[in-house]
Image (tube, rainbow, N blue to C red):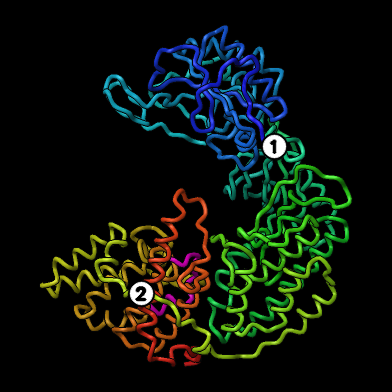
Amino acid sequence: MLKEFHPILLNHTPRKQNIFAIIINQEAPLPHQGWKIHVSSTSEHYQSVLTHIFMLSKILHFNFKYVFSQKDMIGLINRHAERLSGGKLITIYPYTKQETQFLLKKLATILKYFEGPEPLSDQPYNKLNNLSYRYGVINPFIPELNTESVDFWFDGKFYPDNRLPYFELPTFVDETLFPEQNTEKEISYLFSNYEVKEALQFTFGGGVYRGKRITDKQPVIIKEGRPFVGHNFENSSQKLLYHELKILNLFDYLDNIPKVIDFFREDDHLYLVESDLKAETLSDWISHEALNVTPTNRHPQLLKEFKLIFLEIVNTVTAFHSQNVALRDIHSANILIKDRHAYFIDFEESVFTNQSFNNLSDISYLGYEFTHNTKNLIQRDWQRVGLIMLEVFGATNRHLAVTNIHNVWRFFLYFTKIYCVPNNFVQAAHMLLFESNNLNVNVLKDILLSSTYNPCSIAIETIPTNHHLQQPPKVNDLIAILSPRFQDIYKTFLNRSSNIIGINEQADKVLSQINITAGPIPISYNQETKTFTPYFSDGAAGLIWIMNQFYNFLSHQNKLRLATVVDAYQFAFSKSPTFTQGSAGIGFTILNTFEMTHSRKLLDLVTKYYHATCQYGFYRNSEIWYTPANYSNHSQELVETKRQINWFFSSYFKTVSNRKEAFHEDHYSK
C-alpha cells in the first residue's frame, strides 16, 4: 500500500496543495519573485531528509513545501519524470538573497551525507547534487500592481520566467550569488572524443544523442545516465545503462544490434556510446509502406518484404530467449528498418529470466490491455511481436489508445479482408497474440514462409451501412474549425467575391502555399507556415477546401490543377481519425473536390480515406473505441471526435450511395 510522508514530530496535519504539503513558520506573505532552494533525495532516504529539513525549519523559521505521497515522490525521481520538475521533492522559500545564502550553507552541512538527483533547471550548491537553487516567480500576486502574473516584474517591466531544463538567470539578477563556485572545469573526455550533432531524446534520467567520433568520423549514438535518478538502484538510469552494456556485449555476435564503441563516466554521469545504425524506426517505415498507404500494384512485393522482416524479428527474439533474456520493450519504435532488414535497439528494460528480479517497471504497448494477462515474460515478448504484426498491417495506431486487444483484433480481420492479406499472416498473428503460452517457433516460421498473395477488389458488402449519422456539415461549421489564419483567407475570398480578378489572384496565392513534393507524404510542407501537415485546420487540406468554395472563380488553369493537387494526397499518412487533424478532414477535402471535378480517381481515393478513418477511429455503430490519452476532459474530447468523424461519414455515404464503382481499386493501372 502506498504511504504518505510527513516529518516526524509533526503534531498537526499540514495544509495541502496539489501534490505538496506546506509547512508555514513565517506568516509574512512570500515575495512575488526571488530565490528558491530545492532539495532532492533517493526514495530510500526521503523520510530522513524530510525530517531533518523540518527540524531545521523550526530553528531557522523558514517556509517550505514537500511531496507527501509516495507515488508522487517516486514519479518525481524516476527517469521519465517531467524534466522541469524532476528531483524537486522539497522547495524552500527564503525572503532575501542573504537568507538564501545563509540557508544553503546550513542545509549543506546536513545534506552532504545524503544523495539525490539534481534538478535540471537549477544551479547545484557546492557540487552537491541534492541541494540546488534557482531564481523564479514564487507568489503570483504583485502588491505594487494589485494583480497576479506568472512573469517577473522589475523596474516597471514584465520579464518572462523562462522555465528551462538548464540553469538560467533573468537579465536583471546579479549573477554573483556564490562567486566562489565559478571554478574552471576540467577538460571533457566526452567532447574531446565525440562531436554531438543532435539530441534524439531528452528524459530526466539522461539524453540520447547522435554524433560522430572525432578520430575517424564514425557515426555514433551516445546514451547518458544521470546519477541517482530512479526509484531504487535496480531501476536507476545508470543501472539500466550498465545492463544494456552487458546485453550488447553478450549478443555481440548478432549483426542486427548496435555495437559498443565506448563506455565511461564523467562528472558522475555515465555514457554508453554505440554504433549508429542510420535507419528509420519500424513505426516510421509503416507510415509509408503499409498496405493502406501504398498502391495496390506494390502489395505483392511489400508482402514479401513483410514476410522477411517478420522472420528476422522472430529469429532475433528467439536468439535472445535462447540465452534466457526476455526483451520486454518490443515495439515498433525500438525496431529499425534499413534496406528491408530489421534491427533491434534499446535493451535496458530486458531481464534475465533465470535470475531473480524485483520491482520491474510496467511497459505498456499502444495502450492495449490483454484480458488474459500473463506474468510469463517470454510469452509477453511473443504477444508484443503479434502487436507489431497488427501495426504493420495498418490495423493499429501508436498514437491512439484502444480499450483492449480483442477490439483491435476485430479491426485487424476487417482490414485483412479489404487489403487481401494472406491468411498465413492472420494465422501467425493469432498464434502470437492468443497462443503464445505454448508457441512452437518452428511452426510459426513455416506459416510465415508459406504466405502467398492473391489480388482482390474491395467489395461493397465490406462497408457498414447501418450508421445513424447526422446531416453533412454546413459551410459555417467548417469555417469555425479552420485555424484563424485560414479563416482570414476565407474572409478575404468572401469580401472580394464581386471582383473576379481579385478572386483569381487569391486562388493563385492559396495554390502557391501548397508545396507538392515527391516522397511518402506527397503534401509534406507548407512554405508559409513552415509546418509539415496535410491536415484541415492548419494545413494543405484547409487551403484546398477554401479553393473548393470558390471553384467557379478559379482560372481554367487552376481548375485543372485542383484535381491534380488533391490527387497528390494519395495515401498521405494520417495518425488521427479526426476532421481537423486527420483522415476525416483529408477525406472530406477529396470528396468535396470530386463533387466539382467528377474525377473517378478522386472517388476511388476518398474510399481509401473512408477506410482509414474507420480503422483509425475504431468506428462501429456510431461508437468509437478510442480513449483519448492525456486529456483532462475525456468525455468532451470523445464527443468532439465523434462529431468530426460523423461529418465525413455522412457526406461520404451521401455521395457514394449510388456509385458502387467507387469501391474498386483498379484505377492504379489507368
Is residue 511 inside the magenta stretch? no
Residue 35: x percent and y percent? Answer: 47, 20
The one nearer the camera, 472 or 623, is 623
Residue for point 22% across, 75% down: 550
Q: Which residue is drawn at 48% across and 65% down?
A: 576
Q: Is residue 17 left or right of residue 472?
A: right
Magenta segment's dominant SS is loop
Q: Which amino acid does label 1 sit on?
A: Met
Instruction: Please tell me how crowded label 1 is: few (under 14), some (14-19), or many (20+) other residues with Cα within 10 Å.
Output: few
Tag 2: Cα neighbours inside 10 Å, few (<14), some, or many (≥20)?
A: many
Kindly indicate whether the residue at mark 1 contacts the one at mark 2 (C-beta within 8 angstroms): no
| Residue 176 visible to the viewer | yes
Quote the CA–CA distance across marks 2 and 1.
Answer: 53 Å
- Could you tell me which residue is drawn at 58 percent across and 83 percent down? 419
**Which SS class for mark 2?**
helix
Magenta residues, start to end: 565-578
Residue indicated by mark 1: 1
Front residue of this view, candidates 628 and 482 = 628
Residue 589's disc is: 2
